[in-house]
Image (cartoon, grey):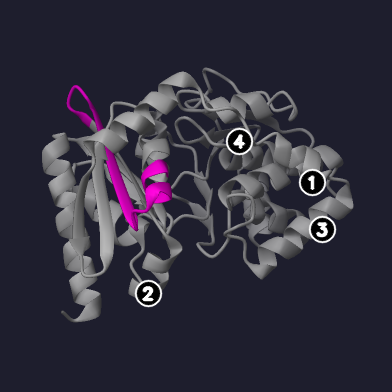
Amino acid sequence: MQIQKVISLIDGLKVKLIVLLCHHNADPDAVCAAFAFSKLLQRLRPELNIEIAAAQGPSRLSRFLLKSIPAKLIVHPRIEEADLLVLLDTNTIQQLDEWGERVKASNAPLVVIDHHASHPDTEHLATLCVADEEASSTCEIIYRLYKEKEVEMGAVEAKALFLGIAFDTRHFILASSNTLKTVAELIDVGVNAEEALSLLSLPMDYPERIARIKASRRVRLMKIQKWLIALSHVSAYQASAARALTGLGAHIAIVAGQREEKIQVSLRACRDFNSETGIHLGRDIAKPLGDYLKGMGGGHSISAGANGVGDVEATLKRCARLLKESIKSRSGK
């Protein structure tokens, strides 16, 4: 059992302080998974001192959800003092920004709990990886850990896991049959699905609207075989802009942003692209793109990102080249 491996690590090292770390601008899956996991650990080992933190804080939507989920996020986590570090929904330490180097320098064991395509550098650093790329979300993995130890969760933990799963599956559009079974069991615990889902409908703020419109105005289209690819750039909200471009009709959207020399790229694709080509955006495009940028990249099959150092124009050209090579290699043309 995966949770037993975590508990054995805690007991063997006589752990007192555990720091749970989420990626920068932590989304609801990351924050809710960290909260529910902290409650599971406290049920199993009540004497533990547990901190939750997110690099650069939680996302706007996550901050809104924290009004309903009693999770307390620490601004300055005690990374150096921790007896155990846990990364949740975070498959590269570069997603921790400046905390990444502190994690690398720590002598504390590192546990990774994630549902993204694994990154070799993270696997090398980790003492234990609890990962499943087939899971819809990190929250779904946390739910399984509760089941493994037969720990009965409370309504608040169930609500948190429901919200994280709903967010990462786009309100269950991307949910598998196993995910839907999990959701049904969470509802049986006491989650009000209609009320919970309403919490995920946060109005889009003005800067995000502007970023989407700018990305649309700046878009460059290219066609590789039958796939329409949209490339664009904005200084912020790259992920939102990429989602908007796929909503407009692109099979694949790549949106880059640059601040000084730092580059951030968001990639999105329609499910048909992944199912027909077999191309996994996180593994096949974002990972080599992160290497090219001397940073890191990864993510899901149809949703991924990369960051590092470089130039927007060169980065977009590199993305286009990686896509072209991947598509042609799989089609044999």
The numbered mark at residue 31 is 4
Residue type at mark 3 is: Glu
Marks 3 and 2, the one that precedes in the sequence: 3
Helix, strand or loop for disc 4? helix
| Image position of 272 with respect to 105: above or below | below
Which label lies toward us, 3 or 4? 3
Q: Is residue 74 left or right of residue 124?
A: right
Query: Can you see residue 270?
Result: yes
Helix, strand or loop for disc 3? helix
Tell me whether circle 4 and circle 2 mark residues in contact (CB < 8 Å): no
Marks 4 and 2, the one that precedes in the sequence: 4
Which label lies toward us, 1 or 4? 1
Helix, strand or loop for disc 2? helix
Residue type at mark 4 is: Val
The numbered mark at residue 276 is 2
User: Label 1 belongs to which residue?
Assistant: 193
Residue sitting at x 37%, y 74%? 276
Task: Categorize mark 2 by other alpha carbons within 10 Å: few (<14), some (14-19), many (20+).
Answer: few
Tell me whether circle 1 and circle 4 mark residues in contact (CB < 8 Å): no
Which stretch appears magenta?
244-262
State the quadrant of the C terminus.
bottom left
Rendered image quadrant of residue 294: top left
Marks 3 and 4, the one that precedes in the sequence: 4
**Percent from the top left, x then y, of residue 29?**
59, 43
